Image: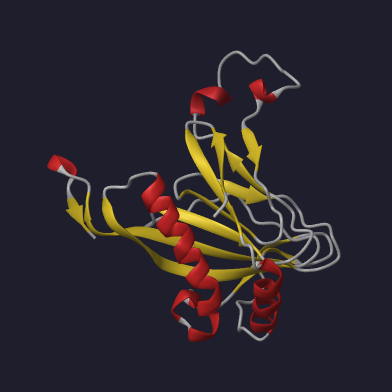
Amino acid sequence: MERVEIPAFPTIIVAYKNPDYLKHNFKLSALLEDEPCTEAQGPKNKEGNALHPRQTLDSHLEKREEYSFFYDWVRECLKDYHEHYKLQTENLRICLSWANKSPKMNEHRGHFHPNSWLSGIYYVSDGCTPTFFESPVSQRKTGIVVKSDSVLDHNTWQSPSETGCLILFPSWLEHYTAITEFGGTRITISLNVMPQGLTSDSLIENTY
């Protein structure tokens, strides 16, 4: 299994490429076509369309048998993540998962995922606008500013948004998307992950 580590600020974002993404994404697109979603939400743009993406009413897609072909692969990624980083917890468990649908001129405002330890985004559709991550180091946003055309001055980082790619990141890391300008619908699957069982040791030990 291919793993790509991406140093971003004082943390690491991990990307996995789905080897069966063509087959998986075709099936996911068909399933999500009929999946009930929220109404368009949030402030409206000049065309009168709400800016916030529609989201599936079911926030536990990971429990549904018809989606198991996809979540079996996600759990393999989480197993690799658990083993590679030598996590002191018995398992990593998906606790929430839902899909997002963003039509043209839609965007996803800056946010983070509460009540979660690790989060993920899987890109289903082609031509997805990227996800941007904000630096959590507040000191970089104050004080003396010396502009640079290199990564030295960047407070945001643009993640891979290639179809069939899953990115995993700390749930506290704020992220957002720019306005979707391509003609189709931007479809992604989000997931939240918690440690499971006995976690850590000594005075920070806990069981989830």
Q: Quadrant of the C terminus?
A: bottom left
Q: Looking at the picture, does residue 192 appear above or below residue 153?
A: below
- In-front residue for pair 37/47: 37
Q: Is residue 43 above or below residue 70?
A: above
Report the residue at 82% width, 68% height from top: 184
Which scheme is used to colour this image of the protein? secondary structure
Q: Residue furthest left?
A: 202
Residue 85, horizontal then vertical, whole percent: 38, 44
Answer left or right for 106 relative to 168: right
Task: Give coordinates of residue 113: x percent, y percent.
Answer: 46, 55
Q: Quadrant of residue 104?
A: bottom right
Residue 121 rendering spot, x and y as whole percentages: 57, 58
Q: In terms of image quadrants, where is residue 203?
A: top left
Q: Quadrant of the N terminus?
A: bottom right
Query: Which one is nearer the viewer's eye here, 147 or 125?
Result: 125
Between residues 176 and 187, which one lies in front from this camera angle? 187
From this view, report whether residue 4 is shown above or below residue 27: above
- Give the residue displayed 53% in from the left and 46% down from the top: 14
Label tally = 0
User: At 38% from the left edge and 52% from the top edge, which residue is drawn?
Assistant: 82
- The residue positioned 27% from the left and 53% from the top of the image is 89
Relative image position of residue 30 (x, y in whole percent): 69, 82
